[in-house]
Image: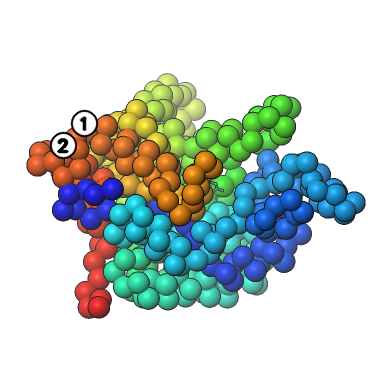
């Protein structure tokens, strides 16, 4: 992409290490990996909306037929191969990637298996980063279904891994969402360890919301384009209303997909709080405004594919909002359908073009706006996440 002298950093990029894929292959309910006649690659089936098509495909397979609809998405080598990640980075001139386990992380594991599996998966990420010294960092996965002392031990473990810069978290928390008071010790531990929370959606909205035509006609569009962003918006607003940002002032969060719809809705949220009789009489109104939280404790990725959403994200993030946004790709999701996966991905070039358009500046331009472009494309991530590593050969 060539962004002048600045480094290009991808902070939203996923992998499923081979050990994780093996777990998915052994499962009988989602998330799982299955092979079907008529599909050259195994299929990765993650979302609730995919279950009806999965069931039909399993029934067809049991009858020895090729399913009319193949569920999920192809599990290509892009999901697990470190070489493929490096090739993708070279193709798109990405200097540094902060990789994370993709959804639904370790959310489905039993209490007893979550701790050891988390340790082993985080060690995998750590090894990959070490092998590519200085090119890769990672957000660790937490064993959230394990007892609290195991979760806290995991935070202590990953905070000592030299390439770990935070943790990736879904919205379910310990099972009751991120406004659960039982999560406060976890948030305190993450804040004390100066680990960023990369908040990422997975569960979307209930299937009924999409209507009866969705299964046959609308593919993954509704859950991914709308369900994911609404899930993030709701999760963060619940945290805010519960006073988490007041109680853990050092907590830092990076929100996927430019905060869902939060930048667009923040004024409405503030107004609803101001006019809410219950919050007023109960005295439970958060101390900081949500605008203050957005400009001090929240960072947004730039994975929104359009300058319109990006401008809202910058403006909602305060006077220095351009310093709180970071470029990402969401690789290996959203591969090109009409061209070679080894080449350029529109999902990357669209996000880069949106950054240039939002600031009206070209890469490498010697101007204030050009500097902002370089900030979003990489310099902000290097500064905020301290992506420096000495001694790499
Ligand atoms: N689909 C997913 O399931 N996860 C992502 O991160 C992107 C698309
Ligand atoms: Zn993602």
Q: Which of the pair 54/309 is nearer the observer?
A: 54
Asked if labels 1 and 2 touch by Cβ distance under 8 angstroms, the answer is yes
Q: How far is disc 2 from disc 1 in space, using C-alphas?
A: 7 Å
Q: Label 1, secondary structure: give it.
A: loop
Q: Quadrant of residue 392?
A: bottom left
Residue displayed at 20% across by 42% down: 363
User: Is residue 67 left or right of 252 when viewed as pictured?
Assistant: right
Q: Which of the pair 56/346 is nearer the observer?
A: 346
Residue 108 is situated, as x and y percent measured from the top left of the image, at 65, 59
| Mark 2 residue's CB less than 8 Å from ligand 2 | no
Residue 182 shows up from this direction: no
Please rate how many residues cluster around mark 1, counting C-alpha atoms within 10 Å: few if below 14, some from 14 to 19, many from 20. few
Residue displayed at 37% across by 48% down: 328
Q: Label 2, secondary structure: give it.
A: helix
Q: Which mark is residue 369?
A: 2
Residue displayed at 41% across by 28% down: 265
Quarter of the image that includes the C terminus: bottom left
Question: Residue 204, relative to residue 342: is it above or below?
Answer: above
Residue 326 shows up from this direction: yes
Residue 249 is situated, as x and y percent measured from the top left of the image, at 32, 51
Residue 258 is situated, as x and y percent measured from the top left of the image, at 39, 40
Residue tagged 1: 360
Q: Residue furthest right?
A: 63
Q: Residue furthest left?
A: 366
User: Is residue 276 left or right of 246 when viewed as pictured?
Assistant: right
Residue displayed at 16% across by 37% down: 369
Residue 66 is situated, as x and y percent measured from the top left of the image, at 81, 48
User: Is residue 291 left or right of 102 when viewed as pictured?
Assistant: left
Mark 2 or 1 closer to N-term?
Answer: 1
Question: Residue 211, relative to residue 223: is it above or below?
Answer: above
């Amino acid at each position: 992409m060539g962004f002048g002298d600045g480094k290009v950093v991808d902070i939203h990029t996923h992998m499923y290490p081979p050990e994780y894929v093996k777990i998915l292959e052994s499962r009988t309910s989602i998330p799982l990996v299955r092979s079907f006649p008529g599909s050259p690659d195994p299929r990765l089936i993650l979302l609730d909306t995919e279950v009806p098509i999965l069931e039909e495909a399993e029934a067809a397979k049991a009858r020895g037929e090729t399913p009319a609809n193949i569920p999920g998405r192809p599990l290509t080598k892009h999901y697990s191969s470190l070489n493929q990640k490096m090739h993708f980075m070279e193709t798109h001139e990405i200097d540094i990637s902060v990789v994370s386990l993709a959804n639904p992380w370790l959310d489905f594991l039993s209490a007893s298996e979550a701790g050891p599996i988390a340790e082993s998966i985080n060690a995998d990420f750590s090894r990959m980063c070490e092998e590519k010294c200085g090119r890769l960092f990672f957000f660790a996965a937490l064993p959230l279904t394990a007892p609290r002392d195991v979760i806290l031990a995991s935070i202590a473990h990953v905070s000592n891994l030299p390439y770990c810069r935070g943790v990736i978290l879904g919205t379910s928390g310990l099972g009751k969402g991120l406004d659960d008071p039982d999560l406060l010790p976890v948030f305190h531990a993450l804040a004390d360890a100066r680990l960023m929370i990369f908040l990422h959606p997975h569960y979307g909205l209930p299937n009924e919301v999409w209507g009866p035509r969705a299964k046959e006609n609308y593919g993954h569009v509704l859950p991914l384009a709308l369900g994911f962003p609404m899930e993030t918006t709701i999760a963060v607003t619940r945290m805010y209303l519960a006073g988490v940002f007041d109680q853990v002032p050092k907590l830092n969060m990076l929100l996927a997909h430019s905060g869902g719809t939060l930048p667009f809705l923040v004024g409405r949220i503030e107004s609803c709080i101001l006019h809410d009789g219950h919050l007023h009489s109960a005295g439970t109104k958060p101390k900081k405004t949500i605008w203050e939280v957005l400009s001090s404790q929240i960072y947004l990725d730039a994975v929104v594919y359009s300058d319109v959403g990006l401008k809202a994200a910058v403006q909602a993030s305060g006077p220095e909002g351009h310093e709180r946004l970071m470029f990402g790709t969401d690789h290996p999701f959203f591969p090109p359908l009409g061209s070679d996966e080894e080449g350029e991905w529109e999902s990357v070039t669209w996000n880069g073009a949106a950054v240039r358009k939002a600031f009206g500046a070209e890469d490498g331009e010697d101007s204030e706006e050009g500097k902002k472009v370089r900030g979003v494309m990489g310099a902000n991530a290097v500064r905020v996440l301290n992506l420096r590593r000495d001694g790499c050969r």
